[in-house]
Amino acid sequence: MSTVTALRAVKGNTKSKVEAELSKTGGLLRLAPCWVPRSFLQPGKRLKLHPDDLYAYGLNRGGIDERWFASTTPAANENRTPDEGLSYVVVGKEKFTLQKAVEDCGATLIGKSIWNKYKKWPVYSKFFDNMGPIPHHMHQSKAQAKLVGQEGKPESYYFPPQHNNVGNNFPYTFMGFEPGTTKDQVRQCIANWNKGDNGILDLSKAYRLKVGSGWLIDPCILHAPGSLCTYEPQWGSDVFGMYQNLVEGREVPWSLLVKDMPKSKHKDIDFIVDQLDWAKNVDPKFKDNHYLEPVPVADTRKEGYVDRWIVYGKVDGEQLFTAKELTVDPGVTAFVKDNGAYGLIAVQGSGKINSQPLNSPKLIRFTELTEDEYFVTEDGAKAGVSFTNTSETEPLVVLRYFGPEVNPDAPKMGAYRKNKFN
């Protein structure tokens, strides 16, 4: 069995290796699984990671409840291992980070527009998988994160059926506040941090999570994600502030509330409350402005495949990321063109992508390589990628996410209500 640890790490510039691989594969880079633990959460056990490996980083680091895709973003974990959160490219018996490949190859991988503006791959996606809910928290805006040398983080959710055979303990997510909530009420919750449950969920509303649907969440909006396994395209940042101090009897330390706020403001409750975008948190049409359901790209059912938008919409007028779900029927080959580079994960079935193996495994050991994840360059995506389902019985299903301003033809928020393809 091939393992990540058995691969030889490449030292120096990766450009020649990347270009040779892209020529061979038609614009594809194979990626190794990228596992991320969280010390304050309990794994949901739906990542296909072997149960013996849930605490592969050590019990003190917490259980593995996330797998990151096409990531050039380091995980903001204390005591993290080198390259934690960074995806590795696999070429033959060698490996190097996708971050390094992007640095060396630039526009060749991610396209001129994104490279010229950001000089990096500015987004990533993950599977987020927990047994129960996590604290009511927010992610800072671009301006707020800049105060501590970080970047803001809008994010999106999609709940893939293939990873949600069970809903676990609490498949509901609290989002924002009930209309009419006041800042004084929230200020009191923060002031009561050390007095037991601070009661911030009393001011919020829980939405039942629906498998096969999703949400788009702006920065500065409070949310307490429930226990469905979630595919999360998002901005390449790991900033957050936890506003809930007790979850299922587990303490949330004050340090997780203020970790991405200026040190001089760590005890300033007014500053902490003002980090929230008040209008968006108390929006009486919150669901209308954030809820997503899939929208087919076109009616291609007669051709044996369906491509659907699963993440779309804009954050403050900007399209920062989008995502699609492709389903290919048994024995069918779909040839799909896209506008820009993307990260891809297969969630069901087996087949080929541009003649390279593409297989969704049943179970993965912590150090094992897989054949389920690729990064596709902009040139490769525009030229078109073939997805062949070699199974006689099972669909091939892949999720892929894109960078900023790549898909001007993506639907607008609420487009699922007008979906004409049933």
Image: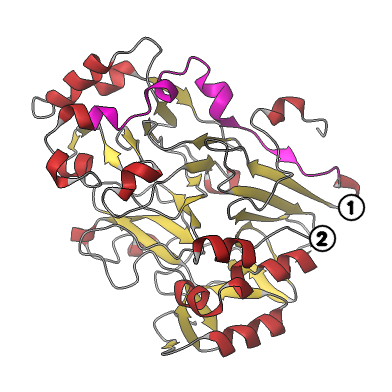
Q: How many marks?
A: 2
Residue type, numbered disc 1: Glu
Camera sees residue 384:
no
Residue drawn at the location 51% of the way across and 77% of the way down: 101
Can you tell which quarter of the image residue 107 is in?
Answer: bottom right
Name the one closer to the observer, 9 or 394.
9
The spot of residue 352 in percent (x, y) is: 72, 70
Can you tell which quarter of the image residue 133 is in?
Answer: top left
Name the one closer to the observer, 385 or 16.
16
Residue drawn at the location 67% of the way across and 34% of the way down: 412
Residue type, numbered disc 2: Ala
Q: Mark 1 or mark 2, which has the lower sequence index?
A: 1
Q: Is residue 379 magenta?
A: no
Looking at the image, residue 152 sits to the left or right of residue 185; the answer is right
Q: Which residue is mark 1?
A: 303
Q: Which residues are magenta?
A: 272-299
Is there a contact, CB below 8 Å, between mark 1 and mark 2?
yes
The spot of residue 182 in percent (x, y) is: 29, 13
Establish if 105 lies above or below 299: below
Camera sees residue 72:
yes
The spot of residue 359 in percent (x, y) is: 63, 67
Q: Secondary structure at mark 1?
A: helix
The spot of residue 161 in percent (x, y) is: 59, 43
Name the one closer to the observer, 397 or 310.
310
Q: Residue furthest right?
A: 302
Q: How far is disc 1 from disc 2 in space, using C-alphas? A: 8 Å
Can you tell which quarter of the image residue 312 is in?
Answer: top right
Q: Residue furthest top?
A: 180
Q: Which residue is mark 2?
A: 334
Q: Is residue 295 magenta?
A: yes
